[in-house]
Image: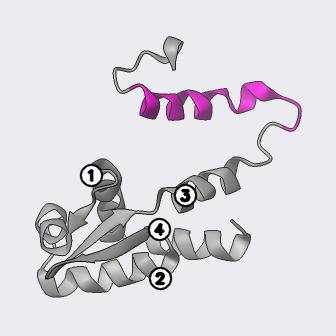
Amino acid sequence: MDERQALSAFAALSQETRLRIVRLLVTAGPAGLAAGALAGEARVSSSNISFHLKELERSGLIQSRREGRSIIYRAAYPALSGLIQFLMRDCCQGHPEVCTPAVAALAICCNPKGDTAHA
């Protein structure tokens, strides 16, 4: 991810509803959620959700696919990982202890029970 892409992603995430939508989609996993379900979960009107989804898709943070009459949205995990990597790329500078808290926080994702000793 380059700086221009990161700025676009951060601009999209800087709005409360869009941040909520991305977090809902991350929680939903690869299967994603239909636009109507997202609107209900995010507490946004159906007419308003399409605006937010369009902005998030334009930034590359989410993807959509058609299933019958529904449009299913899901988190673009490579883009989200790229954003984290962009932020942390040069964090250590020879001091790995600087990155330890971030690595520990991400380890929880792989081990939902919170036991980071086996992550």
Q: Is residue 99 magenta?
A: yes
Whole-angstrom CA distance, mark 1 to mark 3, is 16 Å
Q: Main secondary structure of the magenta part?
A: helix
Whole-angstrom CA distance, mark 1 to mark 2, is 20 Å
Q: Is residue 114 magenta?
A: no
Q: Amino acid at mark 3?
A: Pro
Q: Amino acid at mark 2?
A: Arg
Whole-angstrom CA distance, mark 1 to mark 4, is 14 Å
Residue 43 against residue 58 in the figure, above or below: above
The answer, for residue 14, to whether it is visible in the render is: no
Q: Amino acid at mark 4?
A: Leu
Residue at label 2? 58
Residue 65 against residue 27 in the figure, above or below: below
Residue at label 4? 61
Q: Amino acid at mark 1?
A: Ala
Relative to 68, is 66 on the left or the right?
A: right
Whole-angstrom CA distance, mark 4 to mark 3, is 9 Å
Relative to 46, is 109 on the left or the right?
A: right
Residue at label 1? 28
Provide the secondary structure element on which disc 3 rests: helix
First-in-chain label (4 vs 3): 4
User: Farthest residue toward the top?
Assistant: 117
- The label nearer to you, 2 versus 3, is 3
Residue 59, given in percent of the width and then of the height, sits at 51, 77
Residue at label 3? 78
First-in-chain label (1 vs 4): 1
Please give the range of residues in magenta: 93-111
Q: Choose top left, top right, bottom left or bottom right for residue 96.
A: top right
